[in-house]
Amino acid sequence: MSPSLLPDGNIEPLIRTFLLGIIWSLFLSLLAYSCLFKRDQVYRWSTAAVAGVTGSSTYSWLFHFHYPVALTHGASFAKLACEVIVAVAMLGFMEVQFNRAWSRRFTSLLGFGGLLLLLAAVAAFQESVYLLIAVKAGRLVLIGELLRLCLRATRQRKPDGLLLLMSAGLVLLGELGFIALLLRTGVYTIPNSPSLSSTVGSTGIFFALITIRLIRHSTQSKQELAQRQAELDAMITERAAMLAQQNARLDELVSQRTAELNAANQAKTRLFSIVSHDLRSPVISLQNTLLLLQSKQLTRQENERLTQQLTLSTDRLYTNLDNLLAWSLSQLNELRTLPQPIVVHDLADDILEMAEDMARYKQITCNNQIDDELVVLADENQLRTVLRNLVDNAIKFTPTGGSIWLSGHSTHNWGTILVDDNGLGLHPDQVALLLKQPGLLPGTQGEKGMGLGLRLCQELLTRNGGQLTITSQPNKGTRVQVSLPLLTHSLPSRFPTRLPVTITPPNKTTY
């Protein structure tokens, strides 16, 4: 359509129609985008504000072309409602810049906007100029709150704060002028844009504000999304590292439990072997010896010799059973360790007295040279088991006519007990074999053990915070050193009761 085809060559109707089409296109595009893709508060309030401007622009277009529908009460109410909606939507548009959730003040203003819509309906259908002034005054309240938010945005140097402040100020001046007109004429009327330039200017400023705000919001959303993605990646990395650490810990625990189960199975196998063979054989030997004694067909010398052998076998079997019981309890973690002060010299006398028959049989001399004042802190029964096994081993590997010495002294906070013999002695590889596979080396007269003695001594000393060291030279003898904590405070010469003392074993036992 060319200007010459229009009445009087006026192209204003064409421009107004084109402008209304652009407004409707923008509104429908924003509505579809906000509903399908951007369901957040900024786009919702923007869509509501554009909807209000679109409705108000449509009414102005109908009024400008003198359509009869523009003069109805419903159209008047729609025009006033759109103005209230624009004010409330712009308030929400600014509110979301400062608060993620609605403030109590904004919630009250929403309720106030709802009351203005009811008042606008009554004013439009009653054509009451005073109610119309009240509606405009209420819109001034909303615009005043909008000015406050725009001023706050300007102070915080937000990009769209100053432009919004200027626009809200112009709208406020326009509303004040219209209220003054109503008061002066007293005639009910609905305001419309007086000229095309004002319509284009106000619409352009409005959509410029909306565009700036939406672009800024999209940029912030992308930055926040990138930051959250980075935080999520860091959290995933941290959780993955934590999971890997936990898996490593679980693998370590599984390996540890597997090793413990294997050790338990080996201990069980060893226990069954001891019960089925190492204990069964001595019992059968005892039974045969008793049968010979009961036959009464032996000479006096043979009878005395068998009786002495029976005594030694019984003592050895008792020692083996005692070791077996203590070792089984230690494997089941049911062996309690109760440290108490022990006078080592007195305990050594008891051990040598129990070993007197075996020593006399091999004509071995036993000497107790332990200091009478040496007092260590250990479980008495467990230390007794350790010393008894060490003395039995010394007798086992000492030939007939040899000697055994028990000595002891204190150094700093440790008490040292030494068991020496002048037996055959061992090579270093034999000492290592004795520690790894005890019981495989026979004694000087073919004595065999169950292989629990030294192993049990190691475990019991570890429980009491002690150490075991073996040194030996071939044809010169063997020295076994036991180190235990000393009692660090003075006590009477005899200790009738146990002391509540806790011993922390060292990190590593030296053999």
Image (spheres, helix red, strand yellow):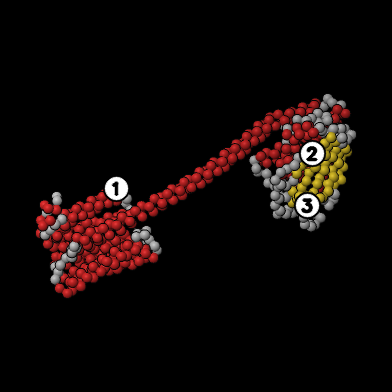
Instruction: Estimate how packed mark 2 is, as few (under 14), some (14 to 19) or many (20 or more) residues with alpha carbons within 10 Å.
Output: some
- At label 3, the amino acid type is Asn
Of helix, strand and loop, which one carries label 1?
helix
Q: Position of residue 218 (x, y in %)?
A: 36, 52
Q: Position of residue 495 (x, y in %)?
A: 77, 54
Circles 1 and 3, Cβ within 8 Å, touching? The answer is: no
Q: Residue at x 81, y 45 (%)?
A: 417
Farthest residue to the top: give it.
Answer: 297
Q: Residue at x 83, y 39 (%)?
A: 479
Mark 3 or mark 2: whose residue is earlier in sequence: 3
Mark 1 or mark 2: whose residue is earlier in sequence: 1
Q: Is residue 169 left or right of residue 253?
A: left
Q: Nearer the viewer, residue 454 or 241?
A: 241
Q: Which residue is mark 1?
A: 36
- At label 2, the amino acid type is Ile
Of helix, strand and loop, which one carries label 3?
loop
Q: Give the Cα separation between the discs numbered 1 and 2.
A: 85 Å
Q: Where on the picture, by quarter, is residue 8? A: bottom left
Q: Give the Cα separation between the discs numbered 3 and 2.
A: 21 Å
Q: Which residue is mark 2?
A: 470
Q: Nearer the viewer, residue 311 or 42?
A: 42
Q: Nearer the viewer, residue 442 or 204?
A: 204
Mark nearer the viewer, 1 or 3 = 1
Q: Give the Cα separation between the discs numbered 1 and 3.
A: 82 Å
Q: Is residue 8 visible?
A: yes
Q: Is residue 180 left or right of residue 334?
A: left
Of helix, strand and loop, which one carries label 2?
strand
The numbered disc on residue 413 is 3
